[in-house]
Amino acid sequence: MIEEVPLPNTEDPDAAPFWEHALRGELAVQVCADCHARRNPPRPMCPVCNSLGLRWEVLSGRGRIWSFVVAHPPLLPAFLPVAPYNVVVVEAEEDPTLRFVGNLVAEPGAPINSVEPTTIAIGQEVVVAFERVADDVALPRFVGL
Amino acid sequence: MSHPLRDKTAVAGIGQTAYVKSLPDTELSLGVQAIKAALDDAGLTPADVDGLASYTMEQNVEVNVARNLGLGDVTWFAQVGFGGGAGCGVIGQAAMAVATGQANVVVCWRSRKRGGPATRPWAQVGDRVEGTAAFTRPVGLLRPVDEIAMLTRRYLHEYGGSREDLGRVAMAVRAHANRNPLAMMHGKPMTMADYLGARMVSEPLCLFDNCLESDGAVACVVVSAERARDLRQPPAYVHAFGQGLNAQHQTMTNYFRDDPLEGPAWTCARVLWSQAAVTPADVDVAQLYDAFSPLILLSLEGYGFCARGEAPSWTLDGGLELGGRLPVNTSGGGMSEAYVHGFNLINEGVRQIRGTSTAQVPGAQVSFVSSGEGVPTSAVLFTKEPAA
């Protein structure tokens, strides 16, 4: 098993702009250049009109918790020191079918076990707060509003 | 209206190895042992086999299976993808091959050793991840149990379900394992207090919401209905089968479609029931893929046994146990017999038709088996008699 937290391949041509926006603290999605449908996670073709043309739209970063889990061992070694920790799925304020996976933290930069799990609730309003974990990677965390 | 595949083929033989945490034999040895047992059960020999079908995740390639069993000319072979969603699709592909004359005797199998922690796919993630996993693994959504726990929390929220509902699912399956001497959890009864007291793995799911980690192999033999009637065992007719991959589905992390709680089972159900001369109300016994207990609730709804949101109430009053409204996973399933990627559910579906289950539903005529919900999936209906 790997010792470190697995990181995204930020050179993936479909996903690279997402991670570039993330480094600037922005939550971004692909928008079809032709039919203007938003899509997430990133992919090369619009599933609505099959266009390959796209642009990126920066969202507000605000949304609601759609669901969450609290993970306990067995886990990858890098996650054992922070277990139990939460993982949340957040639906975007702009479109609740755009959902993002991240962690709820007490404040920007706080660890992923910094929120007491019994205080987390579906429907809770949150805003994104990316945490830089490598030169090329900032991961989505969320803080309560 | 009849369907061209309906009752044209049958499962004529079933075989398995022991199911334990750790077996010394290799996956190859276990696989060919299970296949030989299935051929013996049917009264067939390796020389009769001309077709092979398994999972894309199966590590025993066809040539090695053929060389060990001493098969002759194999004229058809295929694999089905998506892990635990594959099992019934393997049977269905075999049935289509036999019905269309591509092969006459097809062996289907799954052999897997994952009793050891390092053998589990989630533990083998690399330091950089690709595709949709790049959006889940780095934030700690690491394991299948995490991915399904996320859907489960939302399901319980939308429909007012509780951990006790999941506990009754796990207890029903465990009760059946306690009737099956070959089940890993035989002799280990479980109470609701045991369930609620178990350690959490990914809240809201605890240890006993998870399948076992097992070494073992399972196999069966598919032949034409005519041939099956001349063989040693009573045929379990392949009455209907379906596969399903629904719009905008994302394997295991089905959070990115409009309605994440409507999984591939819903698509699979439409094609399955459209082929069948029976309805969900006619099903006597069901084997529902249970890598995790909530998959049984989602499958009950997806396949139309009950309406959406009703599955928790189906767990009440022993509803899923022998004698209840729909007995499920009567050999103990993945949670209490063994986890062989759901292929043991298929053999148990066949035993119910033969009348040889250790938790036999008296006079069972229609036996339903599903593969994994939450991934592109498949299901099969076995019947005791061909439809008129």
Image (tube, rainbow, N blue to C red):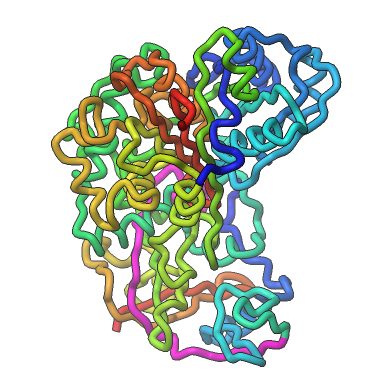
Q: What x and y, as percent, mark residue B304?
A: 35, 50
Asked whether residue B213 is in view, the answer is no
Q: Quadrant of residue B99?
A: top right
Q: In the shown orientation, is residue B375 left or right of residue B24?
A: left
Q: What x and y, as percent, mark residue B241?
A: 53, 41
Residue A56 position (above or below residue B330):
below
Which of B100 and A6 lies nearest the eye of the viewer?
B100
Q: Quadrant of residue B30?
A: top right
Residue B110 position (above or below residue B88):
above
Residue A5: within the magenta?
no
Q: In the shown orientation, is residue B364 left or right of residue A50?
A: left
Which of A50 and A80 lies nearest the eye of the viewer?
A50
Q: What x and y, as percent, mark residue A112?
A: 40, 65
Residue occupying image coordinates x 38% and y 23%: B331
Which of A13 and B124 lies nearest the eye of the viewer?
A13
Residue occupying image coordinates x 36% and y 71%: A105
Which of B42 and A6 lies nearest the eye of the viewer?
B42
Residue occupying image coordinates x 38% and y 61%: B261
Q: Quadrant of residue B334?
A: top left
Which range of residues does the magenta coloring cover?
A53-80
Q: In the shown orientation, is residue B243 left or right of residue B150?
A: right
Q: What x and y, as percent, mark residue B214?
A: 50, 26
Task: Count how many numbered circles sit on residues in the image.
Answer: 0
Asked whether residue B203 is in view, the answer is yes
Residue B278 position (above or below residue B375):
above
